[in-house]
Image: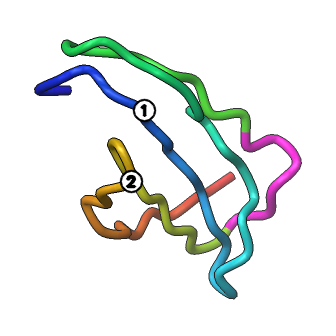
Amino acid sequence: LSRAGFVRLTVYDALGREVSAIVNGQRNAGSHTESFNAVSLPSGIYFYELSIDGVSAGAKKMMLAK
């Protein structure tokens, strides 16, 4: 992160439903690592969105393969 702020990292399924809020809180500037436990999710296409202080970097696509 280039600056400190309120960070939200959310994962959505292909229908746009939120399946996980990985980060939802204040973070300092710098590098961070978070774990995403997808054991209860089926394989498929998901989207994740990172926002800092309410400004989104846009949704990105990811593929979960088990």
Q: How is the image coloured?
A: rainbow
| Lateral position of residue 11 relative to residue 53, left or right | right
- Placement of 25 over or under 39, stated as above or below: above
* Residue 40, horizontal then vertical, whole percent: 88, 48
Give the Cα distance between marks 1 and 2: 8 Å
1 or 2: tag closer to the N-terminus: 1
Mark 1 — residue? 6
* Residue 44, horizontal then vertical, whole percent: 64, 72
- Placement of 16 over or under 53, stated as above or below: below
Question: What are the residue bounds of the magenta stretch?
Answer: 38-43
Q: Is residue 33 magenta?
A: no
Tell me the residue at 30%/68% (across/down): 58
Total marks placed: 2
| Lateral position of residue 11 relative to residue 54, left or right | right
- Placement of 39 over or under 3, stated as above or below: below
Q: Say which of 64 and 58 sits in front.
A: 58
Mark 2: few, some, or many residues within 10 Å (few <14, many ≥20)? Answer: few
Q: What element does badge 1 sit on?
A: strand
Badges 1 and 2: C-beta atoms under 8 Å apart?
A: yes
Q: Main secondary structure of the magenta part?
A: loop
Looking at the rendered structure, the kind of residue marked 2 is Gly
* Residue 34, horizontal then vertical, whole percent: 51, 22
Mark 2 — residue? 54
Tell me the residue at 71%/65% (across/down): 18
